[in-house]
Image: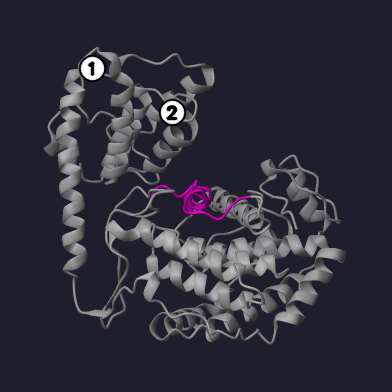
Amino acid sequence: MALDRLLALPPPVSSPKRNSIKLPLEYAAWTKDGPLDTFPSFDAYESSIYDDVLVNFMDPSFLVQALENDLLPRQRVPFILVRTANVRASLQDLVGAEALYTEAATILGDSDPVFIDWLEDFKHVVQQKKEEYMVVWRNAPGVILEDWVPTADLAELPTEPVLSPDMASIASRWRAMREHAPETVERYLKSASVDTNLVESVFSIPPNSISNVIRIGFYYNSIEDVERRSSLADPDDIIRILKDTHKSLQRVFDIAAQKIALTTDEVFELHRSLMVHQKVTSRRPYRYVPTGRVRDHGVFVNTGMGYVRFCPPDQVREEIEAVVNHAQELMAQANHDPFSVAAWIHSAFVNCHPFADGNGRISRLLASIPLIQADLPPITIPPNMFKDYIHALREARLHGNYERLTQVFAQGMISTIENVERLPALTDSDRLRCSAQGRHCSPAYQAPQDDAGDVTISL
């Protein structure tokens, strides 16, 4: 099949089905009735998934979830690798598609020369695209208001740490919650999971639903309503994202406890964990969102007065390594201020902007590590503090002043602690919500199970 068909993608088609866009499962060229047409030995579960794939080929989110999350881990064979790559290519992720095509070719060897020849041409196209991305990065779409600064040139923290005046009070309240009110701690962590998505407009739900998911848990019937402006309309999708966020927070606690080493590869793994159910953009034009992989294109933010330009795509991995290495150095220093270190990590990671999506959420997770190590709660930014938060980030980026950002972190913690302490206890009606999903809700905190959407955080 010609490469021009691969790159000239079909236009979206009208359909009553949510997230509909025509995604043919056959783009790459291969030998007819050859090894890539040989159907794998599926069990009943795998067969049902693939049948659903053929029926729902116009729903990109479903296709990606079914192929990548369900089939590919069970059947990493050329038949599935190539069809998964076709979907990625149709959603403009040519680099990710190339990786899967190449993996399939390695397994096939020389058994399908038609596919091998096609793949060589495809690789040339991908290389051209990478070169085009660099040209776009160098030739910005407008006036550069704020340009990228390499991590090595970012402002350092003061030699003498200036401790946040609120740190002792927050630490005392957090310690008391952990010792005497573990259910309130769990509510704080759920609130952090909700807020980090709300401030990025991943979804939008009204206050009653926010209260429900914080008090009751990440149950599908906890969300009574979704706001009209929300990017996601299905409560099931929102709950899946909240579960992923909460599990990613568990990884951060494990990193802070040094059960998992903080490395560049762990940053990638954390991103994969966070974005399990966000691999396709929620609005047209639908795009594949690579997870656990650096972006291959430049990033610009239009401020209205000019553009902010972030790290060039060919230096992203090197920059992540620089951020991780310096973060480790800062956390290893005796008597460091955890709030200031958190502010530097957050600012440096956002400055790098290594991923196609999820950079803000990942940066807040990583910046929480020095705080957790100091027996403080993880970062949470309530939506009503978003403007102060953005101004503080800009102050750190432009002037190397991290103090305002540390203040926002402290205020967010205090506000969230006070909010979760005010929330009412579970009611009989709440317990009915849980039992409707086959789970028991107790008025006292109990270690929850993953299948209910709760994650026990090791404190």
Q: How many marks?
A: 2
Name the residue located 37 percent from the left edge and 76 percent from the top edge. Answer: 153
Check disc 2 and give the amino acid type: Asp
Compared across the picture, whether 431 is left or right of 309 comes to: right
Q: Is residue 301 left or right of residue 136?
A: right
Q: Residue at the location (63% across, 62% down)?
A: 209
Task: Give the percent coordinates (x, y) of residue 147.
Answer: 29, 76
Residue 151 picture location, percent across and down: 39, 70
Residue 228 appears in the picture as rendered: no
Circle 1 sits on which residue? 110
- Whole-number angstrom distance, CA of label 1 to CA of label 2: 32 Å
Q: Nearer the viewer, residue 355 or 196?
A: 355
Image quadrant in which you'd find residue 423: bottom right
| Stretch in magenta | 260-280
Identify which residue, 400 or 85, lies in the foreground.
400
The quadrant the N terminus occupies is top left
Q: Report crowding for label 1: few under 14, some 14 to 19, many 20 or more residues within 10 A (C-alpha).
A: few
Quarter-wise, where is residue 136 in the image? bottom left
Query: Is 267 within the magenta?
Result: yes
Closer to the camera: disc 1 or disc 2? 1
Which amino acid type is marked by label 1? Answer: Asp
For image coordinates 77% across by 71% down, the residue present is 174
Q: Which mark is residue 52?
A: 2
Q: Name the residue at 33% across, 34% down.
A: 100
Q: Dot 2 surroundings within 10 Å: few (below 14), some, or many (20 or more)?
A: some
Q: Position of residue 220 (x, y in %)?
A: 63, 48
Residue 72 falls within the magenta-colored stretch? no
Q: Which mark is residue 24?
A: none
Quadrant of the rendering where the C terminus is positioned: bottom right
- N-term-proximal mark, 1 vs 2: 2
Q: Position of residue 302 (x, y in %)?
A: 29, 74
